[in-house]
Amino acid sequence: MCSPGGVPVKVFPNPTTGKVNITSAEKINTVQFINQYGQVVYHINQPTTTITTDLSNFSDGLYIVKVQLNNEVLNFRLIKK
């Protein structure tokens, strides 16, 4: 998926049973995982272009992955099985 500014950002695999990769051509400042109740259940503050995290301990369901780049914020839907 591309952001409105044209920066390609990928969140994969989707759906996932555990590990999730987030990649971007531009540096990712923060990532938040938000549950179906609007609660931030996990926050990553690690400026880089590639993030891998393990969601094995997360409850199954739909999450919003909020990715903050330098000048924009992108939201992705992620299904945890």
Image (cartoon, rainbow, N blue to C red):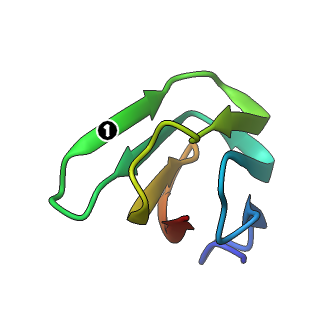
Local crowd at mark 1 within 10 Å, few (<14), some, or many (≥20)? few
From the viewer's side, name the closer residue of 47 and 36. 36
34 with respect to 14 (left or right) = left
The residue depicted at 59 percent of the width and 77 percent of the height is 4
Residue drawn at 75 percent across, 36 percent down: 52
- What secondary structure is found at the residue carrying circle 1? strand
Task: Locate the N terminus and report the quarter of the image it occupies.
Answer: bottom right
Q: Is residue 31 above or below residue 66?
A: above
The residue depicted at 75 percent of the width and 62 percent of the height is: 12
Q: Residue furthest top?
A: 46
Q: Which quadrant, please, contains the C terminus?
A: bottom right
Task: Name the residue located 76 percent from the left edge and 48 percent from the top edge.
Answer: 21
Residue 41 in percent (x, y) is at 31, 38
Q: Determine whether 39 is above or below 65 in the image.
A: above
Relative side of 25 to 43, left or right: right
Q: Amino acid at mark 1?
A: Val
- Residue 3 location (% of width, % of height): 63, 72
* Residue at the disc numbered 1: 41
Q: Residue 78, percent across and down?
A: 53, 67
60 relative position to 41: left or right = right
